[in-house]
Amino acid sequence: MVVNNENRYSGGAKRFPEGGMDGVCSPLSHLSISKSDKQPASVHSPAEYCSYNVKSETVTPGLPGRSGTGYPICLCPPSLTRSFSPHKREPMVDTNDQLVRDMMMHDAERMSHPDAVVNRLVYDSHDCPGSNSQPWRTFKPEAWPFKNMKMKRDLLEQHPGEMLMGFVNKTLQPWYVPENDSDRTLVFESRFESGNLRRAIQVYNTEYDLILRPDINTRGHTQWFFFSISNTRKNVHYKINIINMQKDESLYHIGMQPIIYSEKAAAAEGRHWHRSGHNVCYYQNNIKRKNGKFYYTLTMTFEAKHDNDTIYVAHCYPYTYSELQKYIYGLEADPKRSIRVKREILCKTLAGNNCDLLTVTNFNLHPQILDSRKHIVITGRVHPGESNASWMMRGALEFLTGDSLEAKLLRDNFVFKIVPMLNPDGVINGNYRCSLAGVDLNRVWHYPSKKLHPTIFYTKEMIGRLQEDHKVLLMGDFHGHSRKCNVFMYGCERKATDNSNFKISGIPGFGVTDTMNFRIQEKIFPWLLKRNAPDAFSFAMSSFKVQKSKENTARVVCWREFGLINSFTLEASFGGPSEGANAWDHFGVKDFEGMGAKFVETILDFCNPDTTLIREVCLTLEEQYPVSKHSAALAMKMAAMNGGGTDSDDSGTDSDLDSGDEDKQQEGKKAAARKPQAKKKPRKRRASLVERQSQAK
Ligand SMILES: [Zn+2]
């Protein structure tokens, strides 16, 4: 943290009067700090601060939850999700074009000599002993595959019980059992939480083609992978080709390595999850998809260091649903942390899993003071394959429930509403992007269905109510990014031509002029985060454009519908930073956790009653984003809408005639400017290209 504790806390008696802040918790009012977190007998039930108190039920920690698919899954070995080697930097590897050429030559060679190819199926997750073969067919054969969304929705609504059953098996018989010691066939497995290998085909003695299972109820989104191989032989190099990747860009292009966990290395050397694999290469192959495009291959080679080892391979450090459950139970069992955090069940998912809602604050204050606190909403893991988002979430929770003075300040002044896993079903099933209903839940925020997208429906409703009752200061949705480096943010910048009539809320003036403030408000928090996490966070890569393709995301919907200026998506690369002291090193779990902690810690700088830092930041941002005609017009319009002030607490939202006329004038000018057809077309093409290139998670 750049601003030291002394500065934050100095003159605590003046700046942070004990016990309260005149019933108001504005960023510009005084922050307060209480004497203790200790819960007195008269303390509120935490349910009073949560919008939803769905009937809580006892969940056995450590069980993987319900898959909702009928396919059996077993639990990851407990050591898997929590074992990490002592943190040391792991640089990305050098890449060269020759490697791609070599791999393509290898594939061509294989095609021209098919007789030499073994071509033997050695694993099929849907046809394993103990699996219900094609369980969906047993339900309603004529309905599979779903022909359209309506059929899918109808079935889910009419037959939830049959459709959404899940199995938990402790042990599963492997698909392939080696005949004897000389049988060196690798034994694959992925029927564990977050595993998603569908088939493995042996092509040469030590080379295997793998096919990932698409997201449940979809035909695509293959990117995340998590599986194990066993029956290895020491010093043998195994070449693994995942042949149905779908994205055209990947961080494997620039030297990212997958992560592996060897059971024997962990036992013998204490070496747990780490980056590994050589000749890692990502390239387009010659297998055509139904849409006319081609699949991509991710190939990697591992050298086994032990005989009869079991090696787990994953796209990123796994963080399963059961791991989250264990973590929350750990918080609840900790005598210190348990009084700072309360868990409730926000809702049930389609598969019947709990979606947890955590409230972190200092509950030891008068109800009126608690009611007056501003709320901060943090969500994560809407995209199940982005496990780095969960590690950031864990870092944020560790920090918020910890003993530091900063954490105490945050708990004393804010209420954190945290939904750590918005898509538990997807996480359990090893999806990359979608829910059990085959839907990208970060594209349904405009109109979430209570039945099909319950976690989004209830989270959105909660945010709406919090904003109405208490005001939401900031909303952060944690994600992982598969094509870009660094950690960065997406925010929402309002265009002067935007006609939607929404009310500004969030941070008032900060002492800068209103005209200036309108165009930089949403950039202040990211700038402060860059200041606090210079080796991981990139402000330059952050974007504040609201693209058409993102209209239905959490960030944009919360901004537009609830008027949250500080509505952000926090994206962490699966790879690592390209700038700062750790440039071109891989991110490790500690980096992700540290980023989550910095995110919440930065709120203190953002709301520091001493506005010196904020003023500095505003000046810098003003230089970087000079006043344009648009921003000036927007400032005038917003000032008019808000009755001449910037404070969002004013409830008047009616758009006056002036601003409406201004909009019409601008629309008229725009239409006139657009008239010549020749200019319109290329602009549109460019826009769609840009949109596609920067399409994020
Ligand atoms: Zn995402």
Image: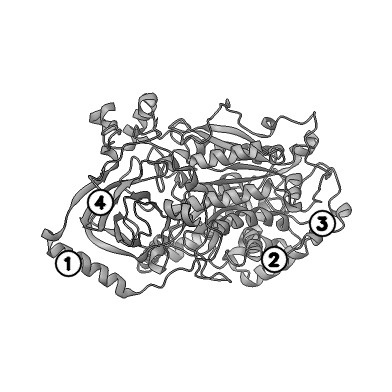
Separation (CA) of disc 1 from disc 3: 68 Å
Q: Residues within 10 Å of mark 2 (few under 14, many from 20)?
A: many
Separation (CA) of disc 2 from disc 3: 23 Å
The percent coordinates of residue 658 (x first, y second) are: 63, 53
The quadrant in which the C terminus is found is bottom left
| Residues at discs 4 and 1 in contact (Cβ within 8 Å) | no
Out of 203 and 366, give the one closest to the viewer: 203
User: Which residue bears the numbered disc 2?
Assistant: 618
Task: Identify which residue is drawn at 74% across, 41% down.
Answer: 362
The quadrant in which the N terminus is found is bottom right
The nearer-to-camera label among 4 and 3 is 4
| Residues at discs 4 and 3 in contact (Cβ within 8 Å) | no
Q: Earlier in the sequence, mark 2 or mark 1?
A: 1
In the image, is 614 to the left or to the right of 633?
A: right
User: Which residue bears the numbered disc 4?
Assistant: 185
Q: Amino acid at mark 2?
A: Cys
User: Which residue bears the numbered disc 3?
Assistant: 9
